[in-house]
Image (cartoon, rainbow, N blue to C red):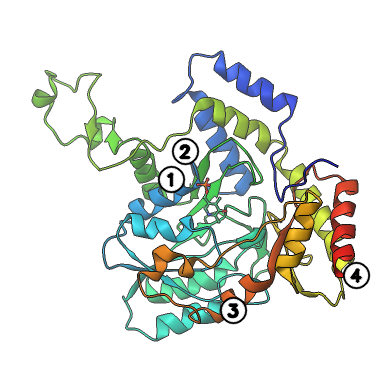
Amino acid sequence: MKNIPYGRQNITTEDIDAVIETLKSDYLTQGPKILEFEKAFANYIGSKYAVAVANGTAALHLCTLALDVKKEQKVITTPITFAASANCVRYCDGEVVFADIDPETYLIDYNAVEKLLKASPKGTYNGIIPVDFAGRAVDLEKFRALADEYNLWIIEDSCHSPGGFFVDSKGKEQNCGNGNFADLAIFSFHPVKHIASGEGGMVTTNDEALYHKLLQLRTHGIVKSEDAFTNSIEFAGGDTQYPLWYMEMQHLGFNYRLTDFQAALGLSQLSRADQGLARRRDIAATYLEAFKNQSFVKGQSGVIEGHAYHLYILEVEDRLGLYNYLRTKNIFAQIHYIPCHLMPYYRQFGWREGDMSQAEKYYKNCISLPMYPTLTAEEQQFVITSIHEFYD
Ligand SMILES: *Cc1c(COP(=O)(O)O)cnc(C)c1O
């Protein structure tokens, strides 16, 4: 049996053809595929705007820049996430405040966030970065109400959940990243995520002003439209109007652009996103059935409406033993995540063991099982049998 990783991309001949076609075109970057991908992605998610960027981390950084995060501003996030969700606050010199997870959902605990907010005067915190961890959607309707009360912005980290949704109080499905509740949302197109473009990312929003800010910051803070210029026509070298070459760098931006051939790959992948999601949900249902009522299982992802199943997680006894045993079978399970607040980098700010008891308890037992659309029924059965074998 070949290696079975925890996640992997699915590249088809259509994907390859789409990339080759773009490689033969006039534009390798800053061409038409970017806008095409952005429009198709916004349409898929249900947001007004989308901005394609170099990767998910760049997407997060552009968000904190666009929201003007600065020194001494406090932003709340979960410790059970990829470090980038927190790091984007540090890129802007802000302070990361972790709030513990809900042990049932593994998502940032609403009550823990509320408790933090209530414990300090209003204005102490500036924003919150909830993560649709493993593919399970955060109830952002609840968080939006809280954010409004405390005047906070929300960046939704939806890297795990394109196509995921929660059901709001009116019974309506609200897609992760649709911009109805969060100010900004971000996605990644790393190969283990639902849609792969090699490296790649996207910011979605319904806020037109933020959209324009993101576009500028993605390309060095440069503006090209005449009505935005602040230098004079005379300085610019024109006579009665600005010359066509003229542009202004008005903010300190970056080069966070995606290339056109990556966008072509992303677009092609996006056209199969629903298929992939359906397969992930089938795999989850099979895992649930296989591990229901097993004495070695302390918790598991289960089958949840709207879950996008980037990961399927079990909490088990003797996690180390199982992990090592699976490796002998070429099954490469993974651990998501080592609590972010206990990374050496964050310990320097005073975070210690015991600060996030639920997250730390979860970390002791969690393991992410292979989960990707091309995982065959036979391979999944092999994973399941191997796990049962280990505990027998
Ligand atoms: C993958 C991921 C990121 C970062 O995305 P990159 O494209 O790898 O930079 C951020 N947050 C979460 C939750 C992720 O899973």
Contact? badges 2 and 4 (CB < 8 Å) = no
Task: From the image, tell me which residue sits under label 3.
Answer: 358
Q: Residue at x 51, y 51 (%)?
A: 186
| Above-or-below relation of 95 to 221 | below
Q: Residue furthest bottom?
A: 119
Q: Nearer the viewer, mark 2 or mark 4?
A: 4
Q: Which mark is residue 58?
A: 1
Where residue 267 sits, quadrant-wise, is top right
Q: Secondary structure at mark 2?
A: loop
Q: Earlier in the sequence, mark 2 or mark 4?
A: 2
Mark number, residue 100: none
Give the residue at x 74% y 59%: 324
Tag 3 and tag 4, C-beta contact below 8 Å: no
Measured from the top left, where is residue 341 in percent x and y? 46, 69
Residue picked out by circle 2 = 54
Label 2 is placed on what type of residue?
A: Ala
Residue drawn 43% across the image and 65% down it: 344
Label 2 CB sits under 8 Å from any ligand 1 atom: no
Q: Amino acid at mark 4?
A: Asp
Q: CA distance from mark 2 to mark 4?
A: 46 Å
The type of residue carrying mark 1 is: Ala
On the rendered structure, is 134 left or right of 130?
Answer: right
Numbered mark located on residue 392 in the image: 4
Q: Spatial distance from mark 4 to mark 1, Cα to Cα?
A: 46 Å
Looking at the picture, how far across and down is residue 265, in whole percent? 62, 30
For the residues bearing labels 2 and 3, Cβ distance under 8 angstroms: no
Label 4 C-beta lies within 8 Å of the nearest ligand 1 atom = no
Residue 299: name its quadrant: bottom right
Which mark lies nearer to you, 4 or 1? 4
Which quadrant holds the N terminus?
top right
Which one is nearer the viewer's eye here, 158 or 173? 158
Looking at marks 3 and 4 on the same chain, the residue that comes earlier in the sequence is marked by: 3
